[in-house]
Image: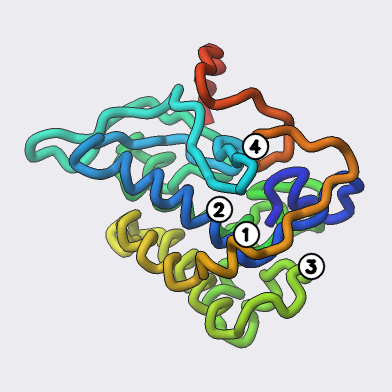
């Protein structure tokens, strides 16, 4: 899946996550974003990326670091105007161009993370060959073709998924990454779509990645050791422009 160290091909510390665990994590993260977008919270996360997803011992996903989160638009407003900030490779194109922030900006970022999970690649990787540095730009042509999506899928997954599920996952990622934000699904719709791709029973029985060093109780998607999410009063890092 990529999950930084978890997903690095060639990593000597972690085995890659299974298809079911990847879908479980994607589903859990999607539910977190859907809650933030709901009428109960009305929050735009603004900096959704793999390193802001924490995993507990059961690989349940929790969102962290709300330093760049913004209250959503109120009244008849369609967006929030703000200084462009976030992480390169994850920000939606319309947000970068105009500074207009909507919940669909988070949907785009989720699409990037889902693509990382499917491919086992970083959103931006300068160590890749020319033309493959930006994951979204490289993968988009393959996602539009049912015959070529396997060029994108992580080869380490082997035959852990069905053709139908692989095509649905690729199609969902492509919808989230639509250049026109109006064509992106809501996070509630993404949650429903992922429920069809994630078999809760299978996910719970999937073999966990074996670590070659003592595992921590909580892990980020980059595989780094993390303190407990309970009672963590660490001040978030200062926001940085994209």
Name the quadrant containing residue 72. top left
Query: Dot 4 surroundings within 10 Å: few (below 14), some, or many (20 or more)?
Result: many
- Answer whether labels 2 and 1 touch (C-beta < 8 Å): yes
Taking the image as shown, residue 111 lies to the left or right of residue 160, namely: left
Q: Where is mark 4, residue-wise?
A: 220
Residue depicted at 25% across the width and 35% down the height: 41
Using the numbered discs, state the Cα–Cα distance from disc 2 to disc 1 in whole angstroms: 6 Å
Q: Which residue is at the front of the view, 130 or 60?
A: 60
Query: Dot 1 surroundings within 10 Å: few (below 14), some, or many (20 or more)?
Result: many
Taking the image as shown, residue 188 lies to the left or right of residue 173, namely: left
Earlier residue among tags 2 and 3: 2
Q: Which residue is at the front of the view, 13 or 94?
A: 13
**Spot occupied by residue 183 in the image (x, y as percentages of width and height):** 31, 64
Earlier residue among tags 4 and 1: 1
Query: Dot 2 surroundings within 10 Å: few (below 14), some, or many (20 or more)?
Result: many
Using the numbered discs, state the Cα–Cα distance from disc 4 to disc 1 in whole angstroms: 14 Å
Q: Tell me: residue 38, above or below residue 84.
A: below
Earlier residue among tags 2 and 4: 2
Q: Where is mark 1, residue-wise?
A: 21
Q: Name the element at disc 3.
A: helix
The N terminus: image quadrant: bottom right
Q: Name the element at disc 4.
A: strand
Q: Where is mark 2, residue-wise?
A: 25
Residue depicted at 29% across the width and 34% down the height: 43
Residue depicted at 38% across the width and 60% down the height: 191
Q: Which residue is at the front of the view, 221 or 179?
A: 221
Disc on res. 156: 3
Q: Tell me: residue 211, above or below residue 164.
A: above
Using the numbered discs, state the Cα–Cα distance from disc 2 to disc 3 in whole angstroms: 18 Å
Using the numbered discs, state the Cα–Cα distance from disc 2 to disc 4 in whole angstroms: 11 Å
């Amino acid at each position: 899946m990529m999950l930084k160290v978890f997903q690095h091909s060639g990593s000597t510390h972690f085995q890659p996550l299974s298809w079911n665990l990847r879908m479980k994590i994607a589903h859990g993260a999607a539910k977190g974003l859907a809650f933030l977008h709901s009428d109960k919270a009305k929050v735009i996360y603004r900096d959704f990326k793999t390193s802001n997803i924490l995993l507990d011992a059961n690989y349940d996903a929790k969102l962290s670091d709300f330093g760049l989160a913004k209250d959503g638009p109120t009244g008849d407003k369609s967006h929030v105007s703000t200084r462009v900030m976030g992480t390169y490779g994850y920000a939606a194109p319309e947000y970068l161009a105009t500074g207009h922030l909507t919940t669909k900006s988070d949907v785009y970022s989720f699409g990037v993370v889902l693509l990382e999970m499917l491919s086992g690649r970083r959103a931006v990787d300068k160590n890749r060959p020319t033309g493959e540095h930006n994951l979204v730009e490289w993968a988009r042509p393959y996602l539009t073709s049912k015959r070529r999506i396997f060029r994108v899928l992580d080869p380490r997954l082997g035959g852990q998924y069905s053709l139908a599920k692989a095509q649905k996952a690729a199609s969902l990622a492509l919808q989230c990454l639509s250049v026109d934000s109006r064509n992106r699904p809501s996070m509630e719709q993404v949650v429903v779509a992922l429920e069809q791709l994630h078999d809760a029973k299978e996910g719970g029985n999937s073999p966990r990645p074996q670590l070659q060093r003592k595992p921590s109780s909580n892990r980020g998607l980059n595989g780094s050791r993390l303190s407990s999410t309970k009672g963590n009063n660490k001040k978030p890092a200062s926001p940085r422009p994209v």
